[in-house]
Image (cartoon, rainbow, N blue to C red):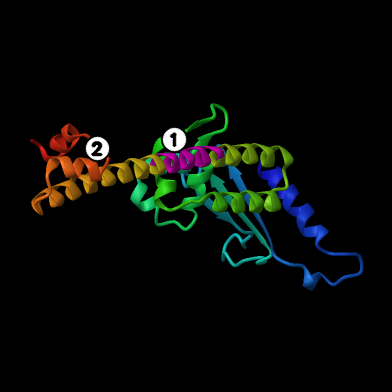
Amino acid sequence: MPERLLYYWARLFSSSLSKGERYDILPPTIMIAILNYPLFPHETDRFHTVFHIREDEEQFLWSHHLEFHVLDLSQFMVKWKKYRREVKQSPEWPWLTMLSAVDGRTKKMDEEMFRELEGIAMTEQDILEALEEWQNLSVDPENRYAYEMRLKWLLDQLSNIRGSREEGLKEGLKKGLEQGREEGKNETIRKMVEKGMSITDVAHILDMTEEEVRERLGD
């Protein structure tokens, strides 16, 4: 995989220069690899590693034009579950949480991670924008398809839950209004009786039976 990523980087870097153009106009090319496994399992357990070319002894940089970022979702999951507070200090944690929330093989969602996404207000628009960015950045069709499926699955789950909540809110509002009307009618009956109106008159005005009026008064 390191050689494969280097090859992709070289293709991108060389394709940004047309024949006859000067080398000094080449733009920096940053390769970002999002993986489901450790690229260097024996060297590091960090979920975000950054690579440059440096001189062996004095460590000065060859060029700012070459930079590799490796984001390991498997290590992110481990760190997220064990050291959540520290992980949440990293700027990339919301997006890695989004990418890690759904297991692409089992199509199952991690409930804790999903609650985290809700807590940081990851909206459907956020996810759609992330999907578009991924499509623009990815150079590997196979990996791009896998992450498209993962993001679409997460988007579907968000939509389903949001729809259920909206339905629940509507139902709750309906019940609340009905309850409010009933309580308001009871208060009206009490005030009418307090002003000296008879049960018969109250029932006639409100189109109720005398028995219903008495029940609302608690008689």
- Residue type at the position of mark 2: Met
> Badges 1 and 2: C-beta atoms under 8 Å apart?
no
Magenta region, residue range: 156-168
* Residue furthest out toward the top: 106
Residue 192: give its label: none
Residue closer to the observer: 20 or 129: 129
As for residue 194 lying within the magenta part, the answer is no
Looking at the image, residue 36 sits to the left or right of residue 23; the answer is left
Crowd rating for badge 1 (residues with CA inside 10 Å; few <14, some 14–19, many 20+)? few
Q: Position of residue 69 (x, y in %)?
A: 59, 53
- Where is the N terminus found, in terms of image quarters? top right
Element type at mark 1: loop
Residue for badge 2: 208
- Where is the C terminus found, in terms of image quarters? top left
Residue 125, compared with residue 25, is above or below; it is above
Q: Residue at x 51, y 43 (%)?
A: 43
Residue 137, compared with residue 215, is above or below; it is below
Q: Is residue 31 visible?
A: yes
As for residue 166 lying within the magenta part, the answer is yes
Residue 110: give its label: 1
Residue closer to the observer: 48 or 152: 152
